[in-house]
């Protein structure tokens, strides 16, 4: 009998899908097919690749409402927000399609009568993309779209929590006329991944997820000279300066901390507030947090859904208890959230104060609806504390002084610095982490540099 897995909904514990795992034979066959298909796909014009990708995007847009409901059932994101993920896919794909032709064009260098010199962009081959559940379309499209536009084939390994998303992506590209074998989805077991990573037919690995798995991927590809793009999460800080627009900062940071129940690599998990604003900020932040509506994510008035699983809820609660045992203060009244209950996926948001660097909540990624708030004396203290992390994905500054924000940003050890906003990926800007937040990057026109290799042509003309 084939091995199967079940996807359990955090909404009510029901089974969303029962899927057969791919056999070793199916995996090897898919990679063999991808290798052949890629060579043909690379010969398609960029214009034709754009045409197919655009049709796939249009399919997802048409199916947005049904896709939104599927997202909610699979991961618990409130239905009122779930459809916005497809809007994000559209935004990113439109930009990539807009710049693809220029970025993938050959570059003719200046030549004299005796020489012709040029640089061409050559696709890398077969890209193995491992995608998480928390933003199941956006994290997938970040690598799938530029890889396909650049002439690569893609083997997609989606999270077992979001198998319906993988199916939707396959439907979108198949309906768009994608040649067979260029994009394939495999529901494979984790134990099968190391074997795939070591195969010579895999030319590049894209992964979004934990540091632990990112390190394992690097170990498994060591010595094989494969390209990797690893986005490994964060413990993202925010700094509210003395000149911040206070209510605006409160509203935006509550959203940045608790959107998607805090289950985002760039969720705000640490907030540092200038001491002159601290008490007022904290009071306002607590008040705004307690206005969130925790409930069934299929109800349109719900603004905070369950976390992805009971195991995730238990892990987050343990981190909160650990902080409390070491002196942290819990600020949120749980009675404000009637649906919150231990032993379920429904978890009340939490704001912690009186924290210190020795608590796990200050240095380990929470990936849940928990944020810490700490007073600071000024910019230098804030910079020191913001940088006091193994992670370096994003940081946000809340100030009216753009010049000062740029100076502070220069001192921050992160891939992205926001000012007066947070938790947003601009398609025109590289999405990049430093330190343990990963290596490589996605988005922007530079993503095509990741998905291709330059090939030099140097011809001497004989007279």
Image (spheres, helix red, strand yellow):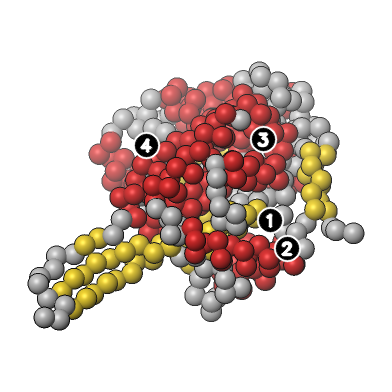
Residue 27 location, x and y as percent?
70, 64
Work out how far the residue at label 2 is from the one at label 1, CA to CA, in angstroms.
9 Å
At numbered mark 1, what does the secondary structure look like: helix, strand or loop? loop
Residue 428 location, quadrant: top left
Residue drawn at the location 18% of the way across and 78% of the way down: 460
Mark 1 crowd level (few <14, some 14–19, many ≥20, 10 Å Cα): some
Mark closer to the chain start, 3 or 4: 3
At numbered mark 2, what does the secondary structure look like: helix, strand or loop? helix
Q: Residue 419 carries which label?
A: 4
Work out how far the residue at label 2 is from the one at label 4, CA to CA, in angstroms.
48 Å
Q: Disc 1 designates what residue? A: 186
Mark 4 crowd level (few <14, some 14–19, many ≥20, 10 Å Cα): some
Residue 370 location, quadrant: top right
Residue 299 location, x and y as percent?
70, 20
Which of discs 1 and 3 lies nearer the camera? The answer is 1
Residue 412 location, x and y as percent?
38, 51
Mark closer to the chain start, 2 or 1: 2
Mark closer to the chain start, 3 or 2: 2
The residue lying toward the viewer, choosing from 26 and 293, is 26
In the rendered structure, the answer to whether residue 142 lies left or right of residue 121 reads right
Work out how far the residue at label 1 is from the one at label 3, CA to CA, in angstroms.
19 Å
Q: Disc 3 designates what residue? A: 71
The residue lying toward the viewer, choosing from 364 and 393, is 393
Which of discs 3 and 4 lies nearer the camera? The answer is 3
Mark 3 crowd level (few <14, some 14–19, many ≥20, 10 Å Cα): many
Callout 2 touching callout 1 (CB < 8 Å): yes
Q: In the image as oriented, which residue stretches furthest toward the top?
A: 301
Callout 3 touching callout 4 (CB < 8 Å): no
Q: Disc 2 designates what residue? A: 26
Residue drawn at the location 15% of the way across and 74% of the way down: 115
């Amino acid at each position: 009998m084939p091995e199967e897995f079940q996807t359990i909904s955090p909404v009510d514990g029901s089974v969303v899908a029962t899927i057969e795992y791919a056999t070793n034979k199916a995996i090897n066959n898919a990679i063999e097919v991808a290798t052949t298909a890629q060579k043909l796909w690379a010969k398609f014009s960029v214009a034709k690749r754009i045409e197919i990708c655009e049709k796939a995007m249009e399919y997802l847009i048409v199916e947005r409402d049904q896709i939104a409901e599927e997202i909610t059932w699979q991961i618990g994101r409130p239905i009122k927000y779930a459809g916005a993920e497809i809007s994000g896919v559209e935004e990113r794909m439109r930009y990539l399609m807009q710049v693809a032709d220029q970025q993938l064009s050959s570059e003719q260098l200046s030549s004299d009568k005796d020489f012709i010199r040029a640089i061409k962009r050559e696709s890398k081959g077969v890209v193995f993309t491992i995608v998480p559940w928390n933003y199941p379309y956006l994290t997938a499209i970040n690598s799938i779209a530029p890889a396909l536009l650049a002439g690569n084939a893609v083997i997609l390994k989606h999270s077992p929590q979001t198998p319906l998303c993988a199916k939707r992506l396959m439907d979108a590209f198949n309906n768009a006329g994608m040649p067979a074998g260029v994009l394939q989805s495999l529901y494979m077991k984790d134990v099968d991944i190391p074997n795939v990573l070591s195969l010579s037919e895999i030319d590049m690995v894209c992964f979004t997820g934990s540091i632990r798995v990112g390190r394992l991927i690097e170990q498994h590809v060591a010595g094989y000279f494969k390209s990797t793009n690893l986005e490994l999460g964060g413990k993202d800080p925010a700094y509210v300066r003395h000149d911040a627009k206070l209510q605006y900062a409160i509203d935006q940071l509550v959203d940045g901390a608790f959107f998607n129940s805090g289950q985002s690599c760039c969720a705000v998990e640490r907030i540092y507030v200038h001491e002159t604003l601290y008490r007022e900020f904290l009071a306002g932040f607590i008040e705004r947090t307690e206005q969130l509506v925790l409930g069934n994510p299929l109800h349109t008035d719900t603004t905070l859904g369950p976390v992805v699983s009971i195991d995730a809820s238990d892990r987050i609660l343990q981190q909160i208890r650990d902080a409390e045992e070491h002196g942290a203060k819990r600020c949120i009244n749980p009675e404000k959230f009637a649906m919150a209950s231990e032993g379920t996926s429904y978890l009340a948001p939490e704001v912690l104060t009186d924290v210190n660097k020795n608590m796990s909540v200050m240095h380990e990624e929470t990936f849940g609806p928990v944020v810490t708030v700490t007073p600071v004396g000024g910019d230098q203290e804030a910079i020191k504390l913001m940088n006091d992390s193994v992670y370096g994905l994003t940081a946000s500054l809340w100030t009216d002084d753009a010049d000062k924000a740029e100076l502070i940003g220069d001192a921050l050890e992160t891939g992205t610095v926001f000012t007066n906003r947070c938790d947003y990926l601009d398609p025109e800007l590289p999405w990049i982490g430093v330190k343990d937040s990963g290596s490589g990057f996605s988005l922007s026109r530079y993503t095509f540099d990741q998905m291709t290799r330059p090939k030099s042509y140097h011809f001497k003309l004989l007279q």
